[in-house]
Image: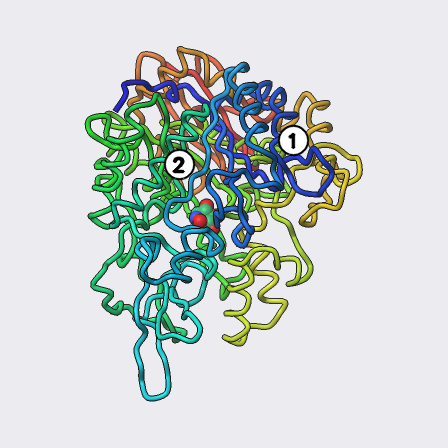
Amino acid sequence: MANNDWWKSSIGYIIYPESFCDSNGDGVGDLGGIIEKLDYLSALGANLLWIGPIFDSPMDDNGYDVRDFYKINPLYGTVDDLKTLLHKAHEKGIKVLLDLPINHTSDEHAWFKKALEDPSSPERGYYYFLKGKREGDRLLPPNNWAGFFSTSAWENIPGTDDFYLHLFTKKMPDVRWDNPELREKFYEIARYYLDLGADGFRIDAMAHIAKDTSWSDSALVNPNGGPVLDPSKFSNRAEMFGYLNEFNEKVFSKYACLTIGEAGGSIQPKESLKLVAHEGGPLNMVFNFDTVWNNGNFDSIDKKDEDIWTDLFQLRFNFMHWYEALHDKADMPLYWCNHDHPRVLSQYGSTAYRNESAKMLFQTLLFMYGTPFIYNGDEIGMSNANYASLDDFSFDRCAVNAIEDFKKRGYDEQTIIHYMNRTSRINARTPMQWDRSENAGFTKGKPHIKINDNYLQGVNVMDEMCDPYSILNFFQYAIGLRKNPIYNDAVNNGPLQWVDPNHPDVLAYLHDGATKLMVISNFRPYTVYFTFYYDIKDVLLHNYEGVILNDHVITLRPYESFLLLVR
Ligand code: NOJ
């Protein structure tokens, strides 16, 4: 692997292109919109973008279903727009990662069409086709596997006994990485974009590229009946490591690029070293989901809001076991949420304390070990969508399938809406709120999805820019501190330890090197107390006015958070 680690001091920013900024008035974000906002991103301090998938797609899964990898989605622009974006970003010192889905294509991709048309074609071997099981008159799928979107992982080809595998929507057939010819196709695609100037990839659904090809039934049981989701059948399996080693050998290692694979929830930190260790790992980092749902919100339709509670013991455990396994051997990204999760402000913070909790959450993450990623909109305190009807969720196939499933299981509409508003990934996909003008300045046309109307109450970039105590200005200042070589060094070289790890409400940590940096954060909407015995040399950043400190006890107001230099 090429020896470079420019990302050690990078600040990542995740752009969900469909909802970021629309430059041509068709109601959908586009590359032109991202280009317009490069100055904004640069002023914020972001210098590493991960842009969601921009390839030609029928948009059954918002671009993760690629029809043609060599064409830019016309909704977003052209290859020339991409070149301009890369060029202008580079001029400003911003690197750009493209999002490359490698586990599946669209069913409208020429390969899949050919595979269906001509079962003897090489393309047939690019996908998993299996015979179903006949039981009397009934034709059943080859096994009991469910995919990630609440349905069977198999779809029948009408008029035949054949099924194809799809771990996501039925319009997204999985491709066969055990076919060397297919692998070469993806290597070519990756080379094409690296040669165009992309600085690397976020590799979508990477964890699932190898399957249990014995195709045996899962022994797990779905308590609600029907197919069962069993990631052990298709996530982070042994063969995946070999495929990625080859990808690195043939492609990544030839470029000074950054690769971050989506490893999902089922990889353990030690195992991930096989992928990301400085010595011999084929990739640079993996995204895991371990710190995303530490409040019991996942799969929580039967829970009341009061039962959703950020569990700091779990959060500490998850941060630390990744840190301990990786910090001296590998790099890792840090993030609270992306386009697949609810907004972090609604998840771990509070809309009642928007300003305080948004700042607290960012500060807590920013000074941990790793490369931090901001999800677009978090820097202005965007929160969950709060939709009123099930129809509002209809543009996301994942949500639609989940809603159908809940209905079948007998849940009433209001319960489902409430649950979706709390957990759905749509929450993070509403348009970016730029100002108070119509459609929050996102588009001059009709937005492709409803905008959160709190942009009229000040949740927008323009209002935030004008307020010296805003979330946005705090983010900008905090990023400046994080990039300061002395603090950056303290963060990267630790050693990191928790302070008062048994505190139920406060997450506090110390980088205990030559420069001692400490973060103390109250995760609760009420006042709590925190005892500590360090001398404060300086308060570098704080989301409240005044420090209440008596006899080694700090009073922390709702979501109060400090960044301290201590002795
Ligand atoms: C992970 C992506 O982040 C998600 O949005 C998508 O639905 C699946 N992979 C399938 O590509």
- How packed mark 2 is, by other alpha carbons closer than 10 Å (few <14, some 14-19, many 20 or more), is some
Residue visible at 72% across and 27% down in the picture = 462
Horizontal placement of 154 versus 523: left or right? left
> As displayed, is residue 166 above or below residue 91?
below
Quadrant of the drawing holding the N terminus: top left
Local secondary structure at mark 1: helix
Residue visible at 37% across and 34% down in the picture = 260
Image x and y of residue 15, in percent: 55, 35
> As displayed, is residue 489 above or below residue 99?
above
**Dividing the picture into quarters, in which one does residue 391 lie?**
bottom right
Q: Are marks 2 and 1 in contact (CB under 8 Å)?
A: no
Q: Nearer the viewer, mark 2 or mark 1?
A: 2
Image x and y of residue 368, in percent: 39, 28
- How packed mark 1 is, by other alpha carbons closer than 10 Å (few <14, some 14-19, many 20 or more), is many
Q: In the image, what residue type sits under mark 2?
A: Ile
Image x and y of residue 178, in percent: 24, 50
Quadrant of the drawing holding the C terminus: top left
Determine if residue 553 is in view: no
Image x and y of residue 339, in percent: 52, 44
Looking at the image, the residue that sits furthest to the bottom is 136
Q: Which residue was labeled with disc 2?
A: 189
Point out the tag, 2 or 1, that comes first from the N-terminus: 1
Q: Nearer the viewer, residue 521 or 86?
A: 86
Local secondary structure at mark 2: helix
Q: Which residue was labeled with disc 1?
A: 33
Q: CA distance from mark 2 to mark 1?
A: 25 Å
Q: In the image, what residue type sits under mark 1?
A: Gly
